[in-house]
Image (tube, grey):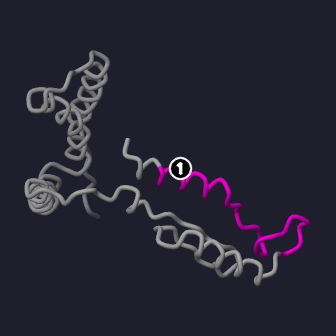
Amino acid sequence: MRIDLAIGILLSIWLAACSTPSSPGGPRGPDGTPAPKATLASEQRRLAELFRGTPVEFEMQRDGSLRITVPLTFAFWPVQAARASAWGGFAYVTLFSMWLGFFAWYRGLALGGTVRVSQVQLVQPFLALLFAVPVLGERLEPVTMMFSLAVIATVFIGKKMPTHIKAAS
């Protein structure tokens, strides 16, 4: 595990554990009285100074509470630039799967009926499992095969079920 990722996760957990949920009417002091806004503003300044140069953000909310966030973007920031093959894969998925694929999908829904054709989408993860064996060298466990076959059987039974279309009156 990368050390910067571990530090980011631990810092997020620590900040979440130290923060208290906002009570109605704003934050309260230890004795239950409303905390003065000057105290929260000074705490915001102190924490901002403490975490200067880090991705930790502090923001005063309308109800007077202090929100502390650690953007996960920085916890997962890559240590090197993405390769051209990664950008090519991203472009492929964007163009074919996410854009052109929708045209074929919605045409299929229109031709075969939404209820019946949408069941095919349930088989997609299991087909990906089957393709991962020869392409990526993955090992297929017997339990995985058993549940995959059960879901595929359910999908095919659902496809065979009659659909009734009500005539427009």
The amino acid at mark 1 is Leu
Image x and y of residue 113, in percent: 19, 50
Quarter in which the N terminus is drawn: top left
**56 in relation to 84, above or below:** below
**Few, some or many residues within 10 Å of mark 1 (<14, 14–19, 20+):** few
Q: Is residue 114 magenta?
A: no
Which image quadrant for residue 141?
top left
Between 167 and 42, the one nearer to me in the picture: 42
Image x and y of residue 37, in percent: 76, 82
Q: Residue at x 89, y 72 (%)?
A: 33
Q: Residue at x 36, y 55 (%)?
A: 76
Q: Residue at x 22, y 36 (%)?
A: 123
**112 in relation to 92, above or below:** above
Magenta range is 7-34
Residue that protrudes farthest toward the bottom in the picture: 38
Quarter in which the C terminus is drawn: bottom left
Circle 1 sits on which residue?
10
Q: Is residue 24 magenta?
A: yes
Image x and y of residue 14, in percent: 61, 53
Residue at disc 1, secondary structure = helix
**10 in relation to 120, above or below:** below
Instruction: Please tell me how many numbered marks the rendered image carries.
Output: 1
Q: Is residue 134 left or right of residue 58?
A: left
Between 83 and 123, the one nearer to me in the picture: 83
